[in-house]
Image: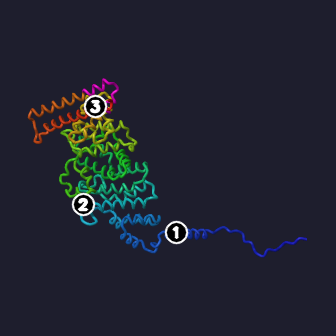
Amino acid sequence: MTSTAETSYTLIPNQKYRRSNRRSRQRCNTLDTDSQSLSTLGHFQTLPLEIFQMVLNYLSVKDISMLSMVSKTISNRLINYISTPSGNRRLLLQDFHNLELPGKREVSYILEHYKSLGLLLKRCTLLLPTKDRLKYTHKILSEVSCFKLNGCPSPLHCLGLQCYGVFLQILTAGWDELECHRVFNFLCELSNLPRKVQTVVSSKPGSARKLELRIRLYCRSVLLNHWIHRSDSAFWLTRILKPWPMVNQARLLYIIFGPVSSLDGDLAPSLFKKKLLCHLIYCSGHVVWQKMIEGPTDETSLKGLADAIKLLYDTEAREWTADDVISLVDELSVVPREWLMENNARLLILSGNNICFTFMANKAVNGRAVELARLMVFLALVCEKDLYCMDWAVKMMQKVCKVFSTPGERNNFLQCVENAFVHMIMDMLQAVLSGDRDEEDSSFLNLFHLVNAQANFHKEILYLTMRSNSNTV
């Protein structure tokens, strides 16, 4: 006989949650989330927002940027602080024109300040997409008129674009190439740079002097001057030049890096003693379009162009081939009209051995022996004038001779070199004998340098020949 065991407890069936229960559970979850968010504030949790912002006023911008890495909640509070009027006044210094004020408001301080501000915004917006980071940055900086291409009424007195440049350099350091493309497109959209460039490259040189100056200052101070690595500088210079055809690239390169007029009192002389302002010498003043045409120029006027050409020729500038750079140099030599050959030769020497040889080899391959011979003579003349070693010119001629495919072509080139020396000396002698001398007596001085250049050039050839003969014996 079987018996059933009775249970000593009562089973209660599962019940569905009521709506009121679900609401209370949601409120509990929300409170838990808020408590977790508040816990990330640490000791700041107990402070009202106003007191928190007062505390920030006692911290440097670098310290605030370190604080932004504590938590996402702290970072959000700092973003709100930056957007407040008091945060704007504190962080957006605008003493861009008082370059010699004593104390903290000197040049080095304001540049360092904007470096720190760039680091702060870089850290605060770390989790945002690139597009949103740029929009937020623009929202913060949009009221600073000196950061705009046409914003400052006195750009030659202003450090605003330099501060904007160091800010952007810190903000975008480490970003990948695609993100930097977006930054450049964003800046072009804000500044309307492509349309302004189109205006200056399609108009008569010098007819829009103020716009040429503003484009020069904006491109150098904001986009080019502050990069540490040459690959970064090459990337940004490529972004500026590549959208345009070769003839416009040459015009634009001359606007950005070509010679400029004197500063006309735009900056106090004492400012040139400051290391941080040395580059203003090369950025300020109006572009001088006739300098390469009217007479020989000095190395200072060509250094910016030569450095830019070397930058594009480097292997780090992946978007430029050797033929691209040589074509650009060739096009540059007729901006706005054909340069004096001496200025061409000086630019090639400053651009370095590889570019100089490639340029000359290109002429040799294309059968332009007479033009190449004249260039060779002017290379020797520049070596004599600027105190370079003449054996460099002789060795360059040796390398070029190897480019010719036949001995006949090589001998014809050497004969052209000698003929070029003769014709140039006769032309200069005729100018001296005609009595048309200026105050500096430049015609006689040029003849003196050319005769010395010819003598030293042939002396180095004789030395080279004698050494090769002795080695053979």
- Circle 3 crowding by C-alpha within 10 Å: few under 14, some 14–19, many from 20: few
Q: Given this view, does label 2 or label 3 mark the residue nearer the observer? A: 3
Name the residue beneath numbered marker 2: 99
Looking at the image, residue 127 sits to the left or right of residue 433; the answer is: right
Looking at the image, residue 137 sits to the left or right of residue 421; the answer is: right
Q: Amino acid at mark 2?
A: Leu
Q: Position of residue 106 (x, y in %)?
A: 27, 63
Q: Farthest residue toward the bottom?
A: 8
Front residue (pair 166, 19): 166
Q: Earlier in the sequence, mark 3 or mark 1?
A: 1
Give the residue drawn at x 39%, y 60%.
Answer: 119
Name the residue beneath numbered marker 1: 36
Name the residue beneath numbered marker 3: 465
Q: Is residue 366 magenta?
A: no
Q: Which residues are magenta?
A: 397-415
Q: Is residue 414 magenta?
A: yes
- Inter-mark Cα distance, 2 to 1: 48 Å
Looking at the image, residue 158 sits to the left or right of residue 187; the answer is: left
Front residue (pair 170, 46): 170
Give the residue drawn at x 33%, y 53%.
Answer: 226
Q: Earlier in the sequence, mark 2 or mark 3?
A: 2
